[in-house]
């Protein structure tokens, strides 16, 4: 599964491999040996990264600190403090955090059940394949699927009503915080399973046997060995799931229109029609998103390098 | 010990229910279009819609172009890094991870500001320019997956020896990449390509903000105006995603199993 390794193992030689640059004591030795063919090989990649990743993003960051005439200002960033924008960030953070925490928890339990629960091997491979599909089944169609399930005419809603329970009268609404969180779990849980499965595989059988020999119960094994070893992985994946949900927009947009104003939807509306009536404020909004997702991802990458210690 | 196994089954069952019920419900919903009973009319209505055909084929074309351009960018770079500049690896890998760190909406916002009609490179001024920008945006989205796939492929072959052998036979670097390295990693490349396709085919945010009528935008329009067709579209999308992932699984069986020797 290429996608598994791609998501699960984004930095096989992680960012912190600084010393590798000092080859033979001269960091620029490779420059001397650079040949035309080498330059042609790497140039398109560098050019692409500059023009379509780095400069556009940096442009936004710079734009967040510029007024209409291009002068430096902190006003845009200060304007993020308006109640509408603060509310957007708050609901986005809550949905992302809830779907990340629940997704990580439920994903871990399912992964433990299929890997260490002595279930048939066929179940494990089926779950892993399905997780690959479901983690990529996001966006617009996912919203449709949940409307058909938990919407006012959805199958589950109708069935529950048939059995005498009115979901919507009980206060549930798909177009709400919990509705969006439940929908996001559909790609968060599988992503967690894909990322955590290799880590669970890394828990050596001997550790369990050693613990049992010393008289540890199953609960004690998890309390003192299993979870502490998995802990960095859990924490890292949690921040990855958070960033994953924080940047998502299509599902929420198709599900709620603009009735649930999460940050990406606010930004979408701003790009579409300048609803904030201030282009600089749009850039500041983007800056806010970049800071939050980058922060979550940096936590993931840092923790990941530490987590790998035990799982070799 | 017995109860442990029972719990595993219960957890598995609950999980399966959460993941299968929405699929069943969506399928059931898509059949409800006629009052008399279940029919496949929603699917007929979708497939016969000219905008479905147009948007789907447009997405497919953009997706394939993105894959080709992505390969032209990624394969030489990954080859170069592996063979000659392993010390650049952390930097290159970090760059390939950026699209996972920068949300798509930020990326397209940056493009709109950078490539507007009053910029030095006004890609957004023409239709063709916007098409190109959309394709390149998808290359960016696919970069993490594409690079991983290619790099995994390179890891399973002996790049050094193959290169030296080809060199001795008088091949230049372009020939080596195109005719020696690429055919050896084609299986890995294809799995990256299918993953890219699965991601690109339903993409909404970037295309919508660039005003391109892709499949994702079409789906969103249908969702806003129809009741049962969206469910049919969700089923179709799920089948497409499943198909792409199935191809990756299938390809994995053909992947060379040689250990890395570098």
Image (cartoon, coloured by chain):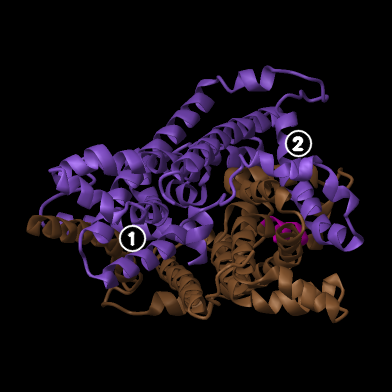
Number of numbered discs on residues: 2
Instruction: Confirm whether circles 1 and 2 share one chain.
Output: yes
Rendered hue of chain A is purple
- For label 2, count other residues whose C-alpha is less than 10 Å away and answer few (under 14), some (14-19) or many (20+): some
SS at mark 2 in the image? helix
Which lettered chain is shown in brown? Answer: B
Q: Where is residue A86 in the image (x, y as percent from the top left)?
A: 50, 24
Q: Are marks 1 and 2 in contact (CB under 8 Å)?
A: no
Q: Nearer the viewer, residue B54 or A46?
A: A46
Please tell me the numbered disc located at residue A59.
Answer: 2
Image height check: is A16 above or below A2? Answer: above
Q: Where is residue A61 in the image (x, y as percent from the top left)?
A: 70, 32
Q: Quadrant of residue A64?
A: top right
Q: Where is residue A14 in the image (x, y as percent from the top left)?
A: 58, 45
Q: In which quarter of the image is residue A55?
A: top right
> In this image, A256 relative to A41: left or right?
left
Which residue sits at x=46%, y=74%? Answer: B249
Which residue sits at x=73%, y=64%? Answer: B79
Q: Where is residue B100 in the image (x, y as percent from the top left)?
A: 58, 48
Chain holding disc 2: A
**Residue A38 seen in this snapshot:** yes
What span is in magenta?
Answer: B132-137
First in sequence: mark 1 vs mark 2: 2
The residue under label 1 is A148
Which residue sits at x=90%, y=50%? Answer: A32
């Amino acid at each position: 599964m290429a996608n598994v390794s791609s998501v699960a193992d984004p930095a096989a030689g992680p960012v912190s491999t600084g010393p590798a640059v000092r080859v033979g004591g001269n960091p620029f030795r490779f420059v001397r040996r650079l040949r035309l063919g080498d330059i042609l090989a790497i140039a398109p990649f560098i050019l692409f990264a500059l023009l379509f990743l780095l400069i556009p993003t940096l442009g936004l960051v710079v734009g967040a600190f510029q007024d209409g005439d291009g002068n430096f200002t902190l006003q845009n960033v200060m304007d993020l403090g308006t109640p509408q924008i603060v509310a957007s960030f708050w609901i986005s953070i809550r949905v992302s955090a809830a779907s990340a925490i629940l997704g990580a928890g439920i994903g871990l339990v399912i992964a433990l059940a299929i890997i260490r629960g002595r279930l048939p091997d066929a179940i494990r491979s089926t779950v892993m394949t399905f997780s690959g599909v479901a983690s990529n089944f996001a966006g617009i169609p996912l919203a449709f699927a949940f409307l058909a399930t938990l919407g006012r005419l959805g199958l589950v809603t109708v069935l529950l009503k048939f059995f005498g329970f009115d979901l919507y009268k009980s206060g549930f609404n798909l177009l709400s915080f919990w509705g969006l969180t439940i929908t996001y779990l559909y790609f968060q849980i599988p992503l967690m399973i894909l990322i955590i499965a290799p880590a669970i595989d890394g828990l050596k059988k001997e550790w369990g046997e050693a613990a049992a020999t010393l008289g540890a119960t199953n609960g004690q094994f998890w309390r003192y060995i299993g979870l502490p070893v998995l802990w960095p992985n859990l924490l890292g994946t949690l921040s990855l799931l958070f960033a994953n949900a924080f940047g998502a927009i299509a599902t929420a947009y198709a599900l709620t229109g603009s009735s649930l104003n999460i940050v990406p939807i606010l930004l979408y509306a701003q790009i579409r029609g300048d609803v904030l009536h201030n282009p600089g404020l749009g850039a500041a909004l983007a800056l806010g998103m970049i800071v939050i997702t980058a922060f979550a991802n940096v936590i993931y990458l840092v923790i990941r390098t530490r987590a790998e210690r035990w799982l070799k | 010990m017995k109860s442990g196994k029972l719990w595993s089954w219960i957890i598995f069952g609950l999980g399966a229910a959460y993941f299968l019920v929405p699929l069943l419900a969506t399928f059931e919903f898509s059949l409800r279009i006629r009052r008399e009973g279940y029919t496949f009319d929603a699917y007929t209505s979708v497939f016969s819609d000219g905008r479905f055909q147009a948007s789907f084929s447009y997405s497919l074309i953009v997706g394939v172009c993105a894959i080709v351009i992505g390969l032209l960018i990624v394969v030489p770079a990954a080859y170069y890094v592996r063979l000659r500049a392993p010390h650049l690896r952390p930097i290159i890998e970090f760059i390939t991870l950026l699209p996972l760190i920068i949300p798509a909406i930020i990326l397209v916002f940056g493009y709109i500001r950078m490539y507007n009609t009053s910029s030095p490179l006004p890609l957004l001024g023409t239709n063709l320019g916007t098409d190109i920008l959309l394709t390149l945006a998808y290359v960016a989205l696919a970069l993490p997956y594409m690079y991983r796939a290619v790099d995994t492929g390179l890891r399973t072959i002996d790049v050094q020896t193959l290169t030296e052998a080809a060199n001795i036979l008088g091949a230049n670097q372009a020939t080596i990449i195109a005719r020696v390295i690429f055919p050896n990693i084609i299986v890995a490349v294809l799995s990256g390509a299918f993953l890219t396709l699965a991601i690109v085919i339903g993409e909404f945010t970037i295309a919508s903000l660039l005003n391109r009528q892709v499949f994702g935008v079409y789906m969103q329009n249908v969702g806003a105006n129809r009741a049962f067709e969206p469910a049919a579209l969700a089923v179709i999308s799920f089948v497409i995603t499943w198909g792409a992932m199935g191809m990756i699984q299938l390809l994995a069986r053909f992947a060379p199993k040689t250990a890395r020797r570098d």
